[in-house]
Amino acid sequence: MLIFRRYRGASEIPRICAGICVFLGMTLLAGPVGAGSRQNSLRESGGAPGKFREVTDEVGRTVRIPQTVRRIVSLAPSLTETIYALGLQNLLVGDTDYCDYPPDAMKKHKVGGAINPNMEEVAALRPDLVLVTKSLNRLETVNALEELGIPTYATDPHTVEEIVTSSRRLADVLGAREAGAALATDLDRRLAALKERLEGVPVKRVLFVVWTAPLISVGQKTFIADALRHAGAESIVESQQDWPHVSMEEAVHLQPEYLVFAANHSQEAAKDLDVLAERPGWNSLEAVKERKLAVISDAVNRPAPRIVSAIEDLARQLHPEAFRVPEKSGGTQTSPAAAPEPNSKRERRRMKVARAKEEEMPACAH
Ligand code: B12
């Protein structure tokens, strides 16, 4: 309740009330629209037919939202990316300091961090829906918004397939069923093509490093562990916890074939490779000695459509042999069909830098 208490400071209450009044006013003014794109889990609200509807979010909460959602605040980079991937960015009135993809998302009004958003900023934007995700945002944030009368819709995908389904469900909730279906079809096609290409390749045993000090990795039931599986790898950490702390002794005992990091930016990677390689424990890892490091875009940390690009990139780094096709002359070349499909110049540049830094390691994956 820390966030809420800070926000409820006496001097802030009049401004908050003003924000809530405007918000409620906007909500009541929202007129009914066609509900053709709604999925089965949606139903008319008994209290205000035609104006509101109830949806069930991914943590099982019933959320009452306007018939047409017009003003969205996203509290996670993954949700911001999904909104853009669905072409709904005009509805996005605010996002977090960490929402940096696509670049246009950086121009949106910032409401602070993902785990500590500024409630006053959020309320001032008069959202009719705030998007949160269970694997990043805090329940306290959701409760504080609820007390302000601002509905929140939470996602909670635990596999790559669930990321696709989750994007599609969100599209339905926002009245963009066709965009959701098209996006899902494209992602499914790319995942199927990758699966076919990796058929029969030996699975690489990897340590996915979320954080270095302390060492934090991923549990088997996370979307990241599943992303690794799609890239022809398996996480050596067996934990049922989602974000387990792993001792260096355990990592040395398990001896991963590869370390996998999400890059934030390459300069940090260069700097911290040297630091890490000199730390006790890390220098006992064969993967460090042999420079068996895969650095992929931070899209792997975000349960959003772009994770498929990160998976393709990782598969390419771990299994280059699966991406070579015989040249007409008899030599080999990289198959263009199997190449990752970065969807912007910026992403292509980030991937190029990440690959160029294959021999370097970031301090942490954030
Ligand atoms: C593990 C971790 C992750 C994991 C999961 C995040 C998480 N659940 O905490 C992954 C790898 C997915 C991740 C991703 C990112 N992370 Co991170 N991550 C961490 C890390 C290393 C540990 C956090 C931790 O201990 N989590 C365990 C507990 C707290 O989380 P949990 O098990 O999921 O349990 C919580 C939820 O289940 C929630 N909950 C329970 N019930 C419900 C119900 C509802 C409806 C909701 C909404 C929530 C909810 O409450 C529980 C307890 O708080 C911290 C740094 C650190 N050392 O603390 C950074 C940190 C949280 N990450 C950070 C950032 C910036 C990111 C990224 C934006 C990085 C990037 N460039 O992409 C992404 C965003 C992902 C997205 N969705 O868009 C920042 C956040 C800064 C801020 N002020 O908001 C931190 C603090 C690192 C830093 N110093 O910069 N991260």
Image: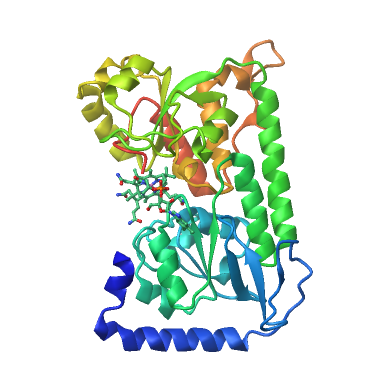
Quadrant where the C terminus sits is: top left
Quarter of the rendering containing residue 195 = top right
Is 101 displayed left or right of 324 in the figure? left
User: Residue extending furthest top?
Assistant: 330
Up-down: is 52 above or below 85?
A: below
Residue 141: where, in percent of width, then height? 40, 65
User: Residue extending furthest right?
Assistant: 36
Up-down: is 188 above or below 231?
A: below
Colour mode of the rendering: rainbow
Q: Is residue 109 visible?
A: no
Residue 147: where, in percent of width, then height? 43, 75
Q: Is residue 185 visible?
A: yes
Residue 138: where, in percent of width, then height? 40, 58
Quarter of the rendering containing residue 26 = bottom right
Is 104 displayed left or right of 164 in the figure? left
Up-down: is 312 above or below 129?
A: above
Q: Which residue is more in the foreground, 10 or 327?
A: 10
Q: Which residue is more in the foreground, 259 or 249?
A: 249
Tag count: 0
Q: Residue at x 63, y 59 (%)?
A: 170
Q: Residue at x 46, y 43 (%)?
A: 301
Q: Residue at x 76, y 66 (%)?
A: 37
Q: Which residue is more in the foreground, 273 or 80?
A: 80
Quadrant where the N terminus sits is: bottom left
Q: Which residue is more in the foreground, 205 or 278?
A: 205
Residue 293: where, in percent of width, then height? 40, 24
Is 186 displayed left or right of 205 in the figure? right
